[in-house]
Amino acid sequence: KNQVEQSPQSLIILEGKNCTLQCNYTVSPFSNLRWYKQDTGRGPVSLTIMTFSENTKSNGRYTATLDADTKQSSLHITASQLSDSASYICVVNISNFGNEKLTFGTGTRLTIIP
Amino acid sequence: DAGVTQSPTHLIKTRGQQVTLRCSPKSGHDTVSWYQQALGQGPQFIFQYYEEEERQRGNFPDRFSGHQFPNYSSELNVNALLLGDSALYLCASSFVGEDYGYTFGSGTRLTVV
């Protein structure tokens, strides 16, 4: 069982609409949670980073939420644009005795159609 | 300010061959991590280098090895290539102890035929 699970696996929405992507994790100890956007064949680009004490973080049209008690996070995209078509990956940073390791979810493939 | 640079961008190798991938970290970063990303999957952690030593390692066989140079750049070596090694190989750099600083390169697409 993957320690970071995302849903849905894929999503298609019309340009201009909003959408919410989900991330559930079981990893611990937890240092921070990140959302990345990855275009096909490219490296991931960071959208938001939240520590366990933060509940929400915004970056333009992207808003991430975190519930450390239930180990759930969401990424909300408002007024979607064609350029938002990409994979969105939830990443949990495990910090153990000073060593950090990123654990990636398998991502949600988002397609925006005109 | 250059970000993380990886080379080559694409590579085709034959089964059984050996390959070396290169990564130059972002200016000011001293830690390099390598990830393997199969098509349609999330990146899987291979290993991390700091102060020219392997600091952490994921569940990858010894065929995967690495090196970090005094200028913080890094190489990933894969021996005895298998078809299953075909993937996008990502390098990420960071500054030790700074959680927020992971920056990824664009990756090297390796195809094993």
Image (spheres, coloured by chain):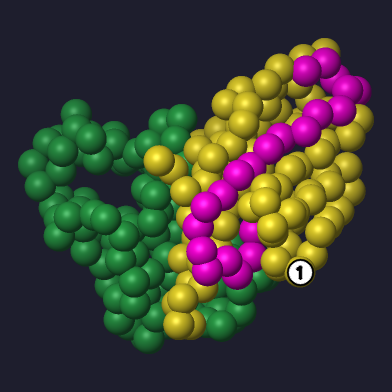
Q: Position of residue A37 (x, y in %)?
A: 66, 43
Mark 1 residue type:
Ser
**Residue drawn 78% across and 18% down?**
A13
Please give left or right for residue A32 compared with residue B14 in the image: right
**Residue A43 to residue A85: above or below:** below
Quadrant of the drawing holding the C terminus of chain A:
top right
The colour chain B appears in is green
Instruction: Give how far across and how far down residue A2 sits, in percent.
Output: 44, 43
Q: Dot 1 lies on which element?
A: loop
Q: Chain of mark 1?
A: A
Residue B68 painted magenta: no
Q: Quadrant of the N terminus of chain A?
A: top left
- Mark 1 surroundings within 10 Å by alpha-carbon count, few (fewer than 14), some (14 through 19), many (20 or more): few
Quadrant in the rendering for residue B35: bottom left
Q: Is residue B26 above or below residue B14?
A: below
Residue located at (19% from left, 29% from top): B113
Q: Which residue in the rendered view is the most extreme toward the front?
A: A69
Give me the chain that's yellow.
A
- How many numbered marks have been drawn onto this rendered protein structure? 1
Q: Which residue is mark 1?
A: A53
Q: In the rendered view, does B42 fall on the left or right side of B100?
A: left
Residue A84 in the image, given as x and y percentages of width and height: 75, 32
Q: Is residue A18 magenta?
A: yes
Residue A49: quarter of image = bottom right
Task: Compare residues A5 and B24 and report the one nearer the observer.
Answer: A5
Magenta stretch, residue numbers: A13-35
**Front-most of residues A60 and B1:** A60
Tell me if I can see residue A60 in this picture.
Answer: yes
Q: Residue at x 68, y 38 (%)?
A: A22
